[in-house]
Amino acid sequence: MKLLKLKRSLKEGWTVFIRNSWLSVATISVLFLSLYIVGSTLLIGMVARELVDNIEKNVNISVYFKPDVSEERINQIKDEIKKEGKVYSIDYISKDQALEKFSSENKDDPVIAGALKEIGENPLLSSLVIRANNQADYSRLAEEIENKYKDDINNINYGKNKDVIEKLDKITSSAKKVGLILGIVFVAIAILITFNTIRLSLFVRRKEFDIMRLVGASNLYIKAPSIFEGMFYGAFSSILAILAVVATAYTAMPMVIKGLITKDQIVKFYLNNLVFIGGVIFAVGLLIGIISSMIAIKKYLKA
Amino acid sequence: MPSIKFEKVEKIYSDNDFNALRNINLLIKQGEFVSVVGRSGAGKTTLTKLIYAGELPTKGDVYFGKKNTKDIKRKHLPYFRRNFGTVFQDFKLLPHKTVFENVAYALEVVGVSTKDILKEVPKILSMVDILEKSEEYPRQLSGGEQQKTALARALINRPKVIIADEPTGNLDPVSSQEIIKLLLKINDLGTTVVLATHDKDIVDKAGRRVVTLENGKVVSDQANGGYVI
């Protein structure tokens, strides 16, 4: 019998949801917009963090050697640096490998291809690409290498990235704070508006609750359909919001972050994280719908 | 069989200090048909509400069988209400439900199986002669048809008492007669009927016990009465 009542409540909630279509549309629109804003804030925050991680991962010290330094000498230097223990990885890139990479990266650019042909010989330098274990070690490590192997080194490439990284760090940490505050504000607004819309929808039907009680319906039996109704509001708006966030992720977002990250990387990131974002939106949507209904109906079920 | 008993009942509405009922002593036996008459404001509605614990007496006691309405816990109220079928001047139908669904709702809340609902509802709808309108919504019906629907809903659970508060107040004379006929028929089947009204014609037509209220007091109680005011 409990199951029967549950089934009936669910059906009743659905019927009210469909037959009060105007109010349902209004409630869903409001909740959808709020959830979309919350979802996009989350998306932007996560993409920003991914970008910073990605750039930080690409931070390295590139040590370019003078053309006359032999491969043996470079390997010797490599081993010496490795022994210091601060490095995470150290890779030797010969001038041939460098040329190959450079040509393949620019194969679509006829000017560069032409220029390479013009020069005839390989103009690039052999290098060591060093990644440190610790972000903080980079500047000291670069300095040490520069001093120790002054005679062999043509140039060392580190300073260029340093400013960018520090700036990005600052931006993301403040963006995180702003995003968090915005997120909380929008969730609060979403709850308030949804709560009020649901309350309005219940207010319109307040006389029906009296009738139901008169006919012998228990409070729970009156309440349950409204709670399911709230659940439907939550479910439908969060599904819409998820679709909208995914659409944003695949259309607007790539335009904004163009050049900062490759397309493959962003797609992989989405595959890993959109489910999480979707889950958060769905959970928040359902909770807002159900809780708003529960609070709102309480008012109309006194005595 | 539960009877309805009023003992020295006084009702004062606290929000406006209105003394709606004064020293009411009344016994309504199971199976009786009682018309409660009086002018507007005489206390008819209050008297009916006290029966199904829609209001509680300020002083005195109202019993349904052995149960004092004062002792009913709020959460048990819906179950207590199932003893009564109620019909009102404004019908009180659920606007978003069809005739069938309105009547079925009263069965759903008590947990009757869908199979039985499909069997019982058409029966009662044909008894009050509204079966052909079962898929229509209240707004598509005439007043008389809405009241028949309300009556069908009141009857579906086979209540011990039907309480009808001005059931004909919004109806034309012909529809009014139909409703009263139905109430008499229901009463013949053993259900107590308490009918509050100020419609002289229908009281005379019923020709049963008449309790007359004036300024919250019973001024006459006749076993086979007419409308005296």
Image (cartoon, coloured by chain):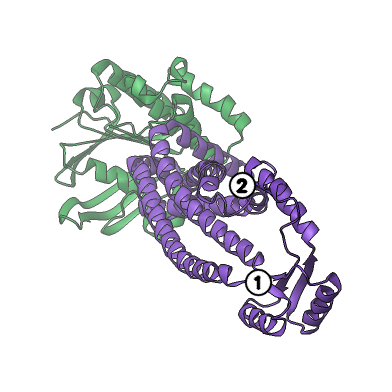
Chain colours: A purple, B green
- The residue located at (27%, 50%) in the rendering is B25
Query: x, y (%) of residue A159?
Result: 57, 72
Q: Where's residue B92, x and y in %?
A: 34, 34
What chain does badge 1 belong to? A
Q: Nearer the viewer, residue B160 or B45?
A: B45
Q: Amino acid at mark 2?
A: Lys
Asked whether, in this view, residue A85 is left or right of residue B33, the answer is: right
- Residue at 43% x, 46% y is A33
The quarter of the picture where the C terminus of chain A appears is bottom left
Label 2: chain letter: A
Q: Is residue B16 left or right of residue A38?
A: left
| Residues at circles 2 and 1 in contact by the CB criterion of under 8 Å | no
Q: Which residue is denoted by mark 2 in the rendering? A: A2
Pointer 1 residue = A155
Q: What amino acid is at disc 1?
A: Asn
Farthest-out residue, right: A72
Q: Is residue A302 above or below residue B85?
A: below
